[in-house]
Amino acid sequence: MATLLTQATLATMTDGYGLIEVGAVEIEAGRIRWIGQMCNLSAAQRALPSHDCGGRLVTPGLIDCHSHIVFGGHRAVEFEMRLNGASYEEIGRAGGGILSTVTATRAASEEELLASALTRADLMIAAGATTIEVKSGYGLTVADELKMLRVARQIAAHRPLRVVTTHLAAHAIPPEYKGRADAYIDEVAIPSLQAAQAEGLIDAVDAFCEGIAFSPDQVARLFRAAKALNLPIKLHAEQLSDLKGAVLAAGMGALSCDHVEYIGDDGVQAMARAGSVAVILPGAFYTLRETQMPPITAFRASGVPMAVATDFNPGSSPIASLPLAMNMACTLFRMTPLEALQGTTRHAARALGLTDRGTFAPGQLADLCIWDATHPAELSYRIGATPLHARIFGGRIDA
Ligand code: DI6
Ligand code: FE
């Protein structure tokens, strides 16, 4: 049975905002069937059951294309220790840092990991997300990476949310492989990738290319294994230094290069040639009090599409709200509100290799947000507010 949204201010995101004032959307079988102005509705459409949006802004459902919401424990104590003057090394010696999350994640059962991931998913839903990407990367053994990915896959069975999962075993070097990153790639990262793909647990492969993590050569080895399995690749690249990870990843056809604060012009040009999306993650920049900004002007000038995501993780980005990430992208990085909204809709879909969402067009999934706003710039302008009025998921309006 078809339904109709009426009296909507539609941001279709097909050409800029693609605004349609006094618009309507016909939804059938979970997909968008028709979009247009109210005055062009047919008599048959006017007879459909309808939901009056009261002039409110309606956008595609938001897409968080980079998150790490499956993990054990938390790092708030460490945050407090740092603010009391403890150094990163002292925190590491006291059992803190990313490896404390690895220890807590290994110790947690699938049920415990799912329960905590669902509370985070609920925060993302409340802020307008309808699709999220979730990465592994806190297990760092074959069994624990698979455990994380099974949990990530289960989220969508419990919530009105579409979940895309990414293998990120090459996130950190666990203590048992200290000084042996190559062995870790061969013995854990690649075997867990193959096992995850055999179980149907992953949609893409990611790695952290950085001095404190994996080298471009190690990442290339992992990516060749991903390509052999026909899996798309993406990379945490140039977050803290310029190791030329983006040149490597784009050269291998990456869907996206993420963080990219320290990317050079060679990286930007390689991404432009490959059509890779730059995923901008202002939550991590803010939390780590970084000062090197991603080269927004160069991405814009070179036609590299930019996405905006939360990077929700316990260490560097404990933020669940895409509208807040959009605000940060505008205020910290000088992205425009249009770019920020493209970054959480059509360009975020592209960063995940998805073509069935992120804009309003006939045939697209009927995942959308109705906002207590009348202009799309309000979504980026407000700080810490969540002007979500209602969310429509697969054509159904959330209670
Ligand atoms: N970059 C980050 O900022 C996070 N991971 C990554 O590759 C940090 C993850 C953590 O500290 O738990
Ligand atoms: Fe990340």
Image (tube, grey):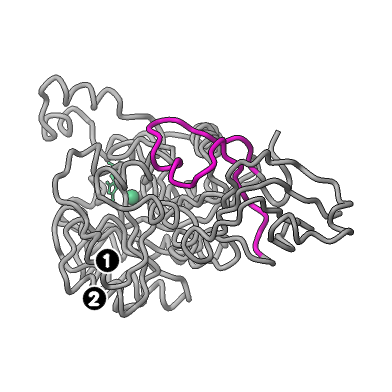
Residue 113 shows up from this direction: no
Residue segment shown in magenta: 364-391
Query: Does residue 267 appear to the left or right of 117 in the view shown?
Result: left
- Per the image, the residue denoted by label 1 is 299
Q: Residue at x 35, y 29 (%)?
A: 74
Q: Can you give x and y, in whole percent of width and height, for residue 261 in the image?
A: 20, 55
| Amino acid type, mark 1 | Phe
As drawn, which residue projects farthest toward the front? 39
Which is nearer the eye, 297 or 311?
A: 297
Q: Quadrant of residue 99?
A: top left
- Per the image, the residue denoted by label 2 is 269
Secondary structure category for the residue under label 2: helix
Q: Can you give x and y, in whole percent of width and height, for residue 139 in the image?
A: 38, 46
Magenta stretch: includes residue 390: yes
Which is nearer the eye, 269 or 68?
A: 269
Secondary structure category for the residue under label 1: helix
